[in-house]
Image (cartoon, helix red, strand yellow):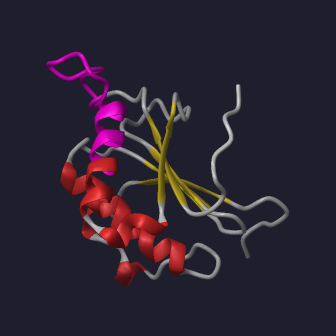
Amino acid sequence: MLRPVEPGPAIVACNTCRHSAEAREDEEGVRGGARLAEALRTAQASDPRYATVAVQDMPCLFACQDHCTVHLRAPGKVGYVMGRFTPDADAARAILDYAIAYAASEHGRVAFREWPEGVKGHFITRTPPEGFVVE
């Protein structure tokens, strides 16, 4: 059931997410989560700044009321689930830009003024790292 991955900052995309609130798949029959994971990998390959954050995917993050969800995580840092993205290059770059600031932060907290416009309004939940709660 569990597949090992390298530890470190990562964006875990739900590859089975709906395409939108109204549609499960796009006109080609592909789920939105699969399209978002593809967009993240394409954006990552196009810019060396993104190499420090892994792009991983898995089925169902259980955020099914939202669509195109990702989990941002790193050892010892607060994690975030974000969703309601369009599965495209603009969303992928915004997620990756935020992930770069997140990876550089001490505990996973990024000052609001540093948030890319494309992630504002997309946060669903935050999760404390194992052994900690947030003050």
Which residue shows up at 60% across the image and 59% down it? 79
Q: Is residue 47 left or right of residue 130?
A: left
Q: Is residue 24 left or right of residue 54?
A: left
Furthest toward the top, the residue is: 29
21 is within the stretch colored magenta? yes
Quadrant assignment for the N terminus: top right
Residue 9 placement (x, y as % from top left): 56, 63
Q: Is residue 123 left or right of residue 103?
A: left
50 up-or-down from 56: above or below? below
Quadrant housing residue 68: top left
Quadrant housing residue 113: bottom left
116 up-or-down from 118: above or below? below
Q: Which residues are magenta?
A: 19-40
Which residue shows up at 53% across the image and 73% down it? 103
Furthest toward the right, the residue is: 131
Q: Nearer the viewer, residue 29 or 38?
A: 38
Residue 29 placement (x, y as % from top left): 23, 16
Query: Can I make out residue 105 in this image?
Result: yes
Residue 120 placement (x, y as % from top left): 33, 64
Residue 32 placement (x, y as % from top left): 30, 31
Which residue shows up at 31% across the image and 25% down it? 31
91 is within the stretch colored magenta? no
Query: Can I make out residue 99 in this image?
Result: no
Which residue shows up at 37% across the image and 54% down it? 122
Quadrant assignment for the C terminus: bottom right
